[in-house]
Amino acid sequence: MERLPTPAGGQQADIPDASPAPACTATATISEQGIVTGWSEGARELLGYTPTQIVGHPAARLLADDTGEQARRKTAGRERFSGQVALLHRDGHRLLRNLLAHRRTPQGPQPAEWLVVSAVAAVSASPRTPDSQALREWVFSQSPCILAVFDTDLRLVTANTGMESALLLPEEQMRGLRLPEITPGPASEEAETKMRRALETGQTQHMQAYLHPTGVSTQRGWSTSLAPLKDPGGAVRAVCLAAHHRQQEHLARQRMLLLNDAGARIGTTSDIQRTVQELADVAVPRLADFAAVDLLDAPRRGGEPARLPATGPITMHRTALHTTPDNHTSHTSHTSHTSHTSHTSHTGYDGHDGDTHPASPPAPGEKILYPAQSPVAQCLAQGHGALYEADDPALTRWAANDPTAAWTRQQGTHSVMVVPLRAHGTTLGVALFARSHRPEPFEADDLWLAEELTAQTAVHLHNAHRHAREHTTTMTLQRSLLPQKLPDQGALDIATRYLPAGSKAGVGGDWFDVIPLSGARVALVVGDVVGHGIRASATMGRVRTAVRTLADVDLPPDELLTYLDDLVIHLAADEGGGAEGTTETAAGIGTTCLYAVYDPVTRHCTIARAGHPPPAVVTPDGNVRFLNVPAGPPLGLGGLPFETLETQLPEGSLLTLYTDGLLETRDHDIDEGLDKMFQALARPAHNLDTVCDRILTTMLTHRPDDDIALLIARTRALNTNQIATFNLPSHPAIVAQARQHTTTQLTTWHLTDTTFTTELIVSELVTNAIRYGHPPIQLRLIHHNHTLTTEVSDTSNTTPHMRRARTYDEGGRGLLLIGQLAQRWGTRHTPTGKTVWTEQTLTPT
């Protein structure tokens, strides 16, 4: 080692600083090769060298003996050095100085170097700085956490044991230095700025940055505040640096923020795969570097999740995966909509045995077989999460024996969490979290956070399973309550469509119906029950059944709606207005309905509506218009009458009935929807199914938010040669003439096989009309659609009733006989009286 000349006499002496030096710091920078690269004015004052005399020379020239060489060896591989070193002044005398050296991390292409600092002289007390004892008393009385006191020149006067342990330096090594010299970095510069502001303003300053020892991560630092210290007169005499550890508080806050964020990001839809992918996306990178979710089974829509086997290996389905971009695999953020071929994973090395590339975890869509003793199987069996370090025997054994776990050792994973997904006592799957790039291992609080996240996800999965089951049940119920096939009738050509809602609300209570009536007439019904789900479907079934029952009585449309309105009111009263007082549970209150009756003999259509949109009609000439049906109130409100519209429809007219879901879509407003529907109806089409599909494709671009029921009917008219009408006088002798008219007409229609039966029916009906009714009496025969209808009308409102005659009764057997001879019979009332009718089914020849 090169030495500078010694003083005369050959003696080296330690010469203490006798006179106070200016308040400055000796600073030098030294390269990793030991060459001086920087020299301050304070260093010149301390050792006598000017920058031109020392910069570029070995720093060993500044060392007085082997203590310096030992200090230099101690810095090897370290980030900082502190201690007493014997230095050699330029004039040859030795100086024992406390040195503090920091290894500065290179910025960009610059090489690393050491920053060496030393106070030129001990800080001498000035008239402005009180003695240390007084300062300590003020710190203890005025500061919440005493760490260090700096004088008005911002140099350390005293530090407590907390400051020493925080920065891993004794007080004597730090005394006389400024904070940036004790612990270089942006936080120290900010702290010194705030200390100066505290001295100037007399107000406490706070910092969000962290102070930390050299070479230690900022995540293990200290949150700092700076308070001015005042004498009894209120004058600021010094500043106190107070700090406390914020790492745990910071981590707790971050965990709560993540948990709060997860509440908004997990479970945004009822899709199971998307929900578990949202869990993985939330966890990476804020909790883990790797997250995967495996479910016990991929259940069919509406099915129950698979049961956890009692013993043995467990087969699961990888459903979600998310890794940080730095991981070796390329499975970053697989979305739930990615399609994968399902197969059991057998290798952990990129699909090639013996490959030296890092192992890849199973991708979404793959089946995974977990051994019975694997951490996953144990976690599911125990029902709670577990933490594993890299050297944990269970994790090591699993990675060594199971190819699907090889990624845990190939990618540098050092900490793993395995957490089950459980909800309402049912195990749905498992979530795996791992850290490889982040140096901190998982802690107990991380496991708690992971369990909270998986619990949230499991609840959403359970609800999704339940929603799928309820949706399937509701759809099954809804489909069973709608007409399974259209009835055989000859008055109308009919096409229908039912489209369930695509929203979370579920299937609603829309329905349609086609009901054959007497006299070749047909009733058309379209309705909409308030609400969605099973309850709405069940209510729809009750209302539809009531409509069919009232239709069998052959009530006019306005009267039918009046009776239906009363029924809904009674249903609501029986249920107390709903269990929760909502319209969805009020037994159908607010239900809308449109009821139309079409008569192919007269081509008259009678329509009434209860809160329902009016029907549209397209005449054979292509004119499209709404029928101006008087608007009645929705069912269940009561108090207001229903009115009818009677109109005559030309043969070949299109009558369109629908529910409001067709018009109330998010794509357009109602007016625009009506225009689109009119345009679709105006285009000619021979097939009614084509018209239905055209309307739906024109007006909808996606699944509707509400159910849609659509019914389109093309009117027919019976030819005059299919109808025979006879006006009869009210006299008993006319019965024989009525039978003769019947025989003649049946011969004309080539229905002689039914002559005997029909004569008996006509004889009984005309006799009853003469005996119990009032003239005029009319006989009408209708031959349509393989059916023979016989009608006898009179002006009496007395309704005949079937009864069983006693042994000696002369009457009472006529209607009993009719009931045996005809397939159906009944009575319908008209504004001028009644009509008793029968129907006989004809066998096609």
Image: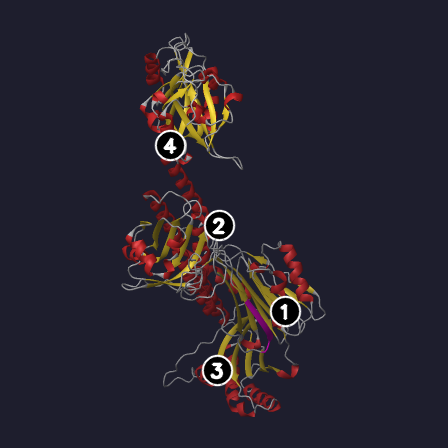
Q: Amino acid at mark 4?
A: Arg
Q: Amino acid at mark 1?
A: Val
Examine the structure image and report whether residue 52 is included in the region drawn in magenta: no
Q: In terms of secondary structure, what is the magenta stretch mainly?
A: strand
Image depth: mark 4 or mark 3 in front: 4
Q: Is residue 578 visible?
A: no
Region in magenta: 490-497
Q: What is the number of the mark on residue 691?
A: 1
Residue count near mark 4 (Cα–Cα under 10 Å), binned few <14, some 14–19, many ≥20: few
Residue that numbered label 3 is attached to: 823
Residue that numbered label 4 is attached to: 73
Residue that numbered label 2 is attached to: 325
In the rendered image, residue 209, in percent from the top left (x then y), is placed at 44, 30
In the rendered image, residue 549, in percent from the top left (x then y), is placed at 47, 69
Gap in Å between the C-alphas at discs 3 and 1?
35 Å
Horizontal arrangement in the rendering, residue 339 relative to residue 436 (left or right): right
